[in-house]
Image: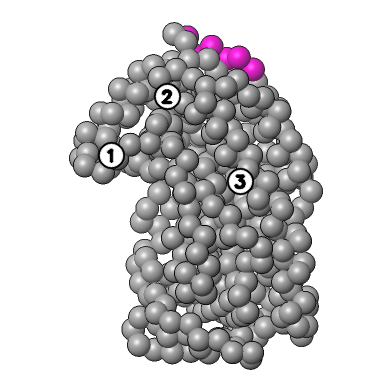
Amino acid sequence: MPAVQSVLVVGAGLAGTAAAILLAEGGVSVDLVEAKPDLGALGSGITLQGNALRVLRQLGVWEEVREQGYAFDTLGLRAPDAAGTLLVELEDQHTGGPDLPCTLGMYRPALARIVADRAVAAGAKSRLGLTCSALDQDADGVDVTFADGSTQRYDLVIGADGIRSWTRQAIGIDTEPRTTGMGIWRVFAPRPESVTRTDLYYGGPSYIAGYCPTGEDSLYAYIVEDYQDRSMLSPEEGLTVMRVLAKAYHGPWDDIRESLTDASRVNYTKFESHVVPAPWNRGRVTLIGDAAHSCPPTLAQGAAQALEDASVLSELLLTREHLDDVWGPYTERRFTRASTVVEGSLQLGKWLLQRERGDVPGLMASISHMLTAPA
């Protein structure tokens, strides 16, 4: 018998919906609540490496993801010169196994909709536009009060509510994300024929300029700069800033830049990071995904680590008879692995901030090697 019979998952991002799918398929009664009224409303593109694809296959959505995304097996490093010179083409590692692509890019809202629909099909009861207002746990369960005044008792609450996690604060964990000093412009745009994989340009007037194909006709591109408050810019002004920054980069960027015309597709965020010290639970409430750890996207592992959290936690909950037997293995299998990814992501950023010539390919390869073994 599973360690729990009823679970509340707070947050319907990738981590939360993945946990909801796996637990519901295992016979657990799952409620999934999400503060946003529409899961597919926000986002540009997302890069999914093989270890993320491995979990998506476990969730039963891989075929649909493959159809809607754009898969590739190499990574290019280019110079910030007048030609966008290709310095090296790296063969990526198949971190999800030899039968899955190394990397797949896709439109983030499309992925959100696929996994959300799968959660409902698996039997999870989804409620959008709803938040929690209180948690009161004892030795046998957790009483949850929702913002609409309703209450419900669960065997377990999973906080998958992101980097600003309400659940994390509600259980008395004071770890908060800190800025790293960088900010990123992102844009969702048409894909020119010259873009068939991710290429990264290090240096020039910005720290990183890169892009990732997300479909036959789409990509997302990004430029990383020193963080500054851009909140006062209008969408049109933001588009202008990104076009100006992109003028320093060439090769496929020349094709991309000409297509940057839709101001509504541009967004700007700061890089932040945190890791909640182990353990990630307080009694019958636990954290997964960005609620437990977050990192800048320099290694493109945020989504993958969130999915791995959900996979490991769900496996343990379904194969252990007692909840107390879950937390030790959960910590052993997730804390060091996720922390190493965060540390690697931060190290890459530090090299850039300090204008230090670090071993970027070596760092990427060592992380990929670690991630090739299933979580």
Does the magenta segment cover residue 86?
yes
Query: Going by the image, does 235 lie left or right of 95?
Result: left
Query: Going by the image, does 226 lie left or right of 6?
Result: left
Residue tagged by mark 2? Answer: 206
Query: Going by the image, does 275 lie left or right of 215?
Result: right
Residue tagged by mark 1? Answer: 230
Q: Are marks 1 and 2 in contact (CB under 8 Å)?
A: no
Instruction: Give the residues drawn in magenta, as a range.
Output: 83-88
Badge 3 density bin: few <14, some 14–19, many ≥20, Cα 10 Å: many
Residue 166: percent from the left, percent from the top?
44, 69
- Badge 3 amino acid: Val
Question: Disc 1 to disc 3, how far (Cα)?
Answer: 25 Å
Examine the rendering and report whether any part of residue 268 can be seen: yes
The residue depicted at 71 percent of the width and 53 percent of the height is 336
Earlier-in-chain disc, 1 versus 2: 2
Residue tagged by mark 3? Answer: 342
